[in-house]
Image (cartoon, grey):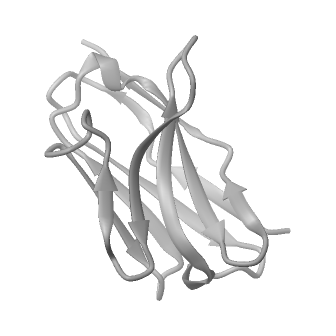
Amino acid sequence: QVQLVESGGGLVQPAGSLRLSCAASGGIHTFTFSAMSWYRQAAGKQRELVARITRAGSTTYSASAKGRFTISRDDAENTLSLQMDSLKPEDTAVYYCNGEHQIDGAYWGQGTQVTVSS
């Protein structure tokens, strides 16, 4: 079964850092994704794009993530990462990994909770 599995979430204090990872498994390889992204959904809000990276390595960030978060992908290791620094309480959300497959469309992970609180 094809899966994207996130890890690395947890509780962190404001101004702290977390690194999220997303691993592809079940016979799919991240190099088949033309782009991969991190989304997040806070309680009572819509899911929003945080950062996106293409196969070529081109990146885009939301205004709130720019300058604090760094997205990267390692197709040899079949992983996507999100380094989050200078975290704020408003970054609290469930973070989802997304892959844009060139044939099958969108793949989603199950999400990992990030809570920023003192």
Question: Is residue 104 toward the left or the right of residue 32 in the image?
Answer: right
- Number of residue marks: 0
Taking depth in this image into account, of 37 and 116 the one nearest to the observer is 37
Question: Is residue 54 toward the left or the right of residue 13 in the image?
Answer: right
What residue sits 54% from the left and 17% below the top?
A: 45
Q: Position of residue 113 (x, y in %)?
A: 51, 31
* Residue 16 to residue 81: above or below: above
Question: Is residue 110 toward the left or the right of residue 52 in the image?
Answer: right
In which quadrant of the rendered view does residue 100 lie?
bottom right
What residue sits 66% from the left and 51% below the top?
A: 109
Q: Locate the N terminus and report the quarter of the image it occupies.
A: bottom right
* Residue 54 to residue 110: above or below: below
What residue sits 31% from the left and 56% below the top?
A: 60
Question: Is residue 35 toward the left or the right of residue 61 in the image?
Answer: right
Q: Position of residue 36 (x, y in %)?
A: 51, 64
Q: Position of residue 71 (x, y in %)?
A: 32, 59
Taking depth in this image into account, of 118 and 41 the one nearest to the observer is 41
Q: Position of residue 50 (x, y in %)?
A: 39, 43
In which quadrant of the rendered view does residue 111 lie?
top right
* Residue 91 to residue 58: above or below: above
- Residue furthest out toward the right: 1
What residue sits 22% from the left and 30% below the top?
A: 87
